[in-house]
Each structure stands twice: as C-alpha cells, then as structure tokens.
C-alpha cells in the first residue's frame, strides 16, 4: 500500500510535553509482542508463513507520512488510521492464495484492496486492545472497527505505532503503521501515567469492609407517657429514667443490642450482642 521510505519520525524528549514519554519504549515492546503473536497465529501457523516482527516504536511524525494506501477505521473512542507497505500486503496475499507475490509496480487489484481493508481492521483492533489494556472497560468503546475508508496520509505531529516486518518472500523488511487519533492518544497517556506511579501509590486497594462507612445511631431508651403528662411538662421538670440496654441502629434498622455504661464521665456502649 505504501512505498518504501526512510522513517520520518523519532521519539521526542519527555520534558517537551510533560508526558510519560520515557515509557513509550516499553509500550512499543508490548505492541511488538501483540503483533508478533498475531502473525504467528493468523499467518505463520495457518499458512506456513515466516513473518517476523523485527522491531516496533511509538513516535510523533516530524513531517507528513509518505506513501498512499492509508485507511481509516472508526471505533467508538475515535478513529485509527492504518497503512502498510505494499510488499507486505502482496506477500500476505501470496501466502493466503499459495501463489508467488506479484511485483510492486503492478496495478492493485480489487482482491488486494479488500485484503488491505480486512487486515487493516484486524491490526486496528489489535492496537485498540493494547491501548485499552489495564484501563477501565467501556463496552461501547470496545466494538470492532468499522469501515476501512481510504484517507490521506497522517499529518505532521501525529503519533504513530510503527513496526518493521520481515519474511523470506520479501526482498527487504516492510513497515506497518497505525496512526492514533487524539482520543486514543489520551488513552495512551492515561495508561502510561498509571504505570509511572510509585509502588506505594499502586498498593492493593483496601478491603471493602474497611472502605464502607455507616452512621451508627444509639437509641438509649423508650419511655411511654400519657398524653396528659406530656402536655403538662414544664421547663425544669425531671423525668426519672433507668438506663439498661440500648439499640444500635443503621438507617433506622436495629442491628445490635448494647449495655450503656459510663467511662471518664461519658456514656458509652459496651457488651454488644446481635439483635433478635
């Protein structure tokens, strides 16, 4: 789909954006592993291929990406734009149909275009899963990519996942690239920011029983009085009471019984027992 060319991007310094760019190499290695697994399962095992992912990177384009054959795939979170060197597509097509790969200067066929869209959707879905890894799932954003619309090459400043792939049927390695929309880039920064946290900040979440809080209300007594006695109450009157068992309530529900005691001049509850 795209002609061979020298890469036109390089990682930028972490201080220039205030982002965890120093973790991009680790992310790129995970992407390389994902892609290697895909080629091994989908191509090498099924079609006796020998495709190998030699390396991968994630960097920002310093100028517009070269070549044609870029396709945009729409996902709920945003689009991913995928492009691959044509010799990679021709080699994959040759493996699929058991033929020799045609020369790169031949005219593209409709079969090649359909395969490019199909593979682009698979690679975009693979990249989306890696960008979402370790973050809260959003079912609406996890649907497979739609479309495969031809688009212009990604512009300068776009962040691109870049992989170099070799196979015996290709005279030189080919490149496979996935360009990230801003929404996916933010997802990436969120993932890397979590990884950047110190180990103390990534401690295991406290058990649910220690995180839930309830307001406990102690009902010390109930005293029944005739209405006439209540109506006759005046300031300064004293009602004799006897403190015995109190009820401990949460949201109006009685959970425990407890004894009322005095400690350091304060009333307190002790001797809790389940409420029947």
Image: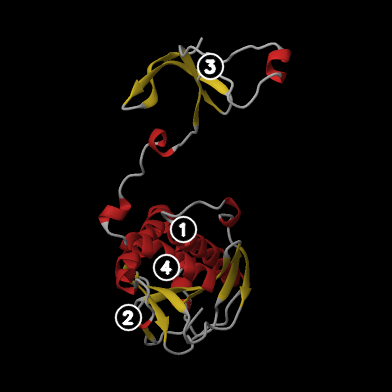
**Secondary element at tag 2:** helix
Q: Marks 4 and 2: which is nearer the front? A: 2
What is the C-alpha distance between the residues marked 2 and 3? 66 Å
Residue at the spot of label 2:
15
What is the C-alpha distance between the residues marked 4 and 2? 14 Å
Q: Which mark is residue 161?
A: none
Q: Nearer the viewer, residue 67 or 135?
A: 135
Tell me where residue 49 sits by quadrant.
bottom left
Upstream in sequence: badge 1 or badge 3: 1
Few, some or many residues within 10 Å of mark 3 (<14, 14–19, 20+) = few
Q: Marks 4 and 3: which is nearer the front? A: 3
Residue at the spot of label 1:
132
Image coordinates for residue 106, horizontal then vertical, percent: 53, 83
What is the C-alpha distance between the residues marked 1 and 2? 25 Å
What is the C-alpha distance between the residues marked 1 and 4? 11 Å
**Secondary element at tag 1:** helix
Image coordinates for residue 76, horizontal then vertical, percent: 61, 61
Image coordinates for residue 27, horizontal then vertical, percent: 34, 65
Residue at the spot of label 4:
189
Q: Marks 2 and 3: which is nearer the front? A: 3
């Amino acid at each position: 789909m795209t002609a061979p060319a020298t890469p036109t991007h390089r990682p930028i310094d972490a201080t220039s954006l205030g982002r965890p760019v120093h973790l991009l190499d680790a992310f790129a290695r995970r992407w390389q592993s994902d892609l290697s697994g895909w080629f091994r399962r989908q191509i090498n095992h099924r079609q006796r291929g020998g495709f190998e992912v030699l390396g991968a990177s994630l960097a920002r384009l310093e100028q517009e990406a070269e070549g044609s054959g870029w396709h945009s795939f729409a996902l709920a979170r945003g689009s991913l734009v995928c492009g691959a060197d044509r010799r990679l597509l021709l080699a994959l097509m040759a493996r699929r149909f058991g033929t020799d790969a045609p020369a790169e200067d031949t005219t593209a066929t409709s079969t090649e275009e359909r395969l490019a869209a199909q593979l682009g959707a698979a690679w975009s879905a693979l990249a989306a899963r890696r960008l979402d890894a370790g973050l809260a799932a959003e079912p609406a954003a996890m649907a497979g990519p739609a479309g495969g619309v031809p688009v212009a090459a990604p512009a300068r400043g776009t962040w691109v996942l870049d992989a170099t792939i070799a196979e015996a049927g290709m005279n030189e390695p080919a490149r496979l690239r996935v360009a990230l929309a801003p929404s996916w880039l933010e997802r990436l920064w969120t993932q890397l920011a979590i990884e950047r946290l110190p180990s103390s900040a990534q401690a295991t979440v406290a058990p649910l029983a220690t995180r839930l809080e309830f307001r406990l209300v102690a009902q010390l007594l109930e005293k029944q009085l005739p209405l006439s006695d209540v109506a006759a109450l005046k300031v300064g009157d004293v009602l004799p009471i006897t403190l015995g068992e109190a009820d401990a309530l949460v949201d109006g529900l009685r959970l425990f019984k407890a004894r009322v005691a005095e400690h350091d001049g304060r009333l307190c509850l002790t001797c809790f027992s389940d409420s029947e």
